[in-house]
């Protein structure tokens, strides 16, 4: 399934890129479609951080992302990295004491805050409290009049010099020079560059599996092993979990060798928040595509066979063998070069080398799992002998793993 992100650069007075605004897009057309604002932001967050990768999307620059009133109040927001995201408040959010208090909490986490399409409303009495928390005010040069802009400009320059004024919808050299003369330090608009479309490929999720994991995460005494088992059965979630760790402060110098280790690194509280966010998003997406189903089936089949053979050979790190099989087709699932994908996953070096095609101690296990999935006896026999797997055990293993995979992804093969 293809996913899209709109990206428009933000420039400084020297016409250098200093940030990007990330915009919701649902196809290659450079236009915002009709969609609920909450859903649009959730899609931007998931596609940027967990599907395409924020490094690829924003090139290391901060990302301005629109937030609705509802999402501002959600704890999930605090899972984002403050040095990577600027919280941009949509113009229709009411300025209330409740909002200001919430922004104080967000600010204390290290986030920067922007006001989008801002026009001063004389009815609002708490701008002073709000402006103390704000880092950027974006003013639309098309929608706003010179008089409306001047009220904000004079207030900021006179009382809040810490706020940077950002001129958006700047479409001509004249508007750009005018904004510079008026004291604006940041600029955005078609005069510089129209939004670019960044495209990626997402792995369809099994929504039922997400809800099962949510149920396990809500239990008073959580069973980590059951949570691990359910996450391992959902390729899209496993992939996103590893990418999430790679882009958060939770990342350890140690490479991930199992899903259990990844969960413990992230923490159950943060895992729960991201699962909720993903489930909200997946509820509104239709899963389709026979090719994806086939690839996911094959990936899970390989993973389970690798794990079973590792256990039979008394490999203490059998979880690593599961990951080798699980991610052996990730390039086909995402339709991207394998090296680009693996660079974003904090996996153990041996796992990465095996998936990349290098000859490691894990390679025969992966080769055996592929041969068993095809019931290719010419390949199976020498590999089975190498791994000390009795030939009589092959067909029962095939049937057992097939049944497990079918139950896992709920498709009829």
Image (cartoon, rainbow, N blue to C red):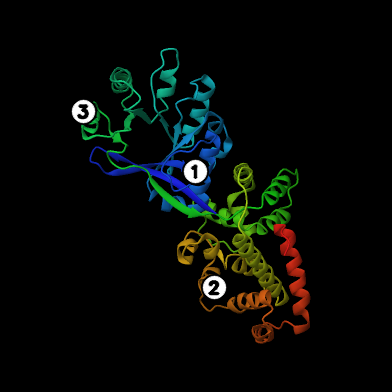
Would you name the residue on which mark 2 appears? 354
Q: Secondary structure at mark 2?
A: helix
Q: Is residue 156 left or right of residue 124?
A: left
Residue 377 against residue 18 in the figure, above or below = below
Report the disc number at residue 181: 3
Q: As displayed, is residue 145 above or below residue 406?
A: above
In the picture of the structure, the residue carrying the numbered disc 1 is: 44
Between marks 1 and 3 in the image, the one whose residue lies nearer the viewer: 1
**Which secondary structure lies at badge 1?**
helix
Proximity of marks 1 and 2: CB atoms separated by less than 8 Å: no
Against 83, residue 345 (above or below) is below
Residue at the image point whose x is 54% and y is 22% from the top: 98
Residue 45: x %, y % from top left = 51, 44
Q: Taking the image as drawn, is residue 218 in sight?
A: yes
| Distance from Cα at disc 2 to Cα at disc 3 | 58 Å
Give the label on residue 82, or none.
Answer: none
**Nearest to N terminus: mark 1 or mark 2:** 1
Sequence-wise, the earlier of marks 1 and 3 is 1
């Amino acid at each position: 399934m293809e996913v899209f992100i709109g990206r428009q650069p933000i420039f400084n007075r020297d016409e250098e890129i200093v940030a990007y605004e990330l915009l919701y897009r649902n196809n290659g057309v450079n236009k915002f479609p009709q969609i609920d604002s909450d859903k649009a932001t959730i899609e931007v967050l998931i596609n940027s951080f967990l599907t395409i990768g924020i490094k690829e999307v924003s090139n290391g620059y901060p990302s301005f992302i629109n937030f609705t009133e509802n999402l501002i109040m959600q704890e999930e927001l605090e899972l984002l990295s403050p040095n990577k995201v600027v919280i941009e408040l949509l113009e229709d959010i009411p300025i209330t004491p409740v909002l200001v208090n919430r922004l104080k909490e967000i600010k204390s986490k290290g986030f920067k805050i922007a006001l989008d399409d801002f026009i001063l409303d004389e009815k609002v009495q708490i701008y002073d409290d709000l402006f103390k928390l704000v880092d950027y005010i974006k003013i639309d040069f098309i929608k706003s009049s010179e008089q409306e802009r001047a009220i904000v400009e004079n207030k900021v320059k006179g009382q809040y010099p810490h706020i940077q004024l950002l001129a958006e919808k700047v479409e001509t050299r004249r508007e750009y020079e005018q904004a510079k003369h008026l004291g604006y330090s940041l600029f955005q608009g078609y005069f510089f560059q129209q939004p670019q479309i960044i495209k990626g490929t997402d792995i369809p999720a099994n929504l039922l599996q997400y809800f099962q994991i949510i149920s396990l995460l809500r239990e008073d005494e959580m069973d980590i092993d059951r949570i691990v088992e359910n996450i391992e059965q959902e390729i899209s979630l496993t992939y996103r979990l590893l990418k999430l760790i790679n882009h958060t402060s939770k990342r350890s110098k140690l490479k991930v060798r199992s899903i259990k280790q990844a969960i413990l690194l992230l923490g159950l509280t943060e895992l729960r928040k991201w699962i909720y966010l993903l489930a909200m998003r997946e509820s509104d997406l239709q899963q389709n595509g026979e090719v994806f189903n086939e690839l996911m089936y094959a990936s899970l089949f390989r993973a389970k066979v690798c794990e079973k053979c590792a256990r039979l050979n008394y490999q203490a790190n059998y979880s690593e063998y599961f990951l080798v099989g699980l991610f052996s087709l990730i390039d086909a699932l995402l339709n991207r070069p394998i090296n680009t994908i693996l660079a974003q996953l904090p996996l153990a070096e041996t796992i990465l080398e095996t998936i990349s095609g290098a000859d490691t101690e894990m390679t025969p296990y992966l080769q055996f799992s592929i041969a068993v999935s095809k019931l290719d006896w010419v390949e199976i026999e020498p590999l089975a002998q190498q791994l000390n797997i009795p030939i009589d055990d092959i067909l029962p293993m095939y049937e057992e793993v097939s049944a497990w995979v079918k139950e896992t992804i709920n498709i009829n093969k």
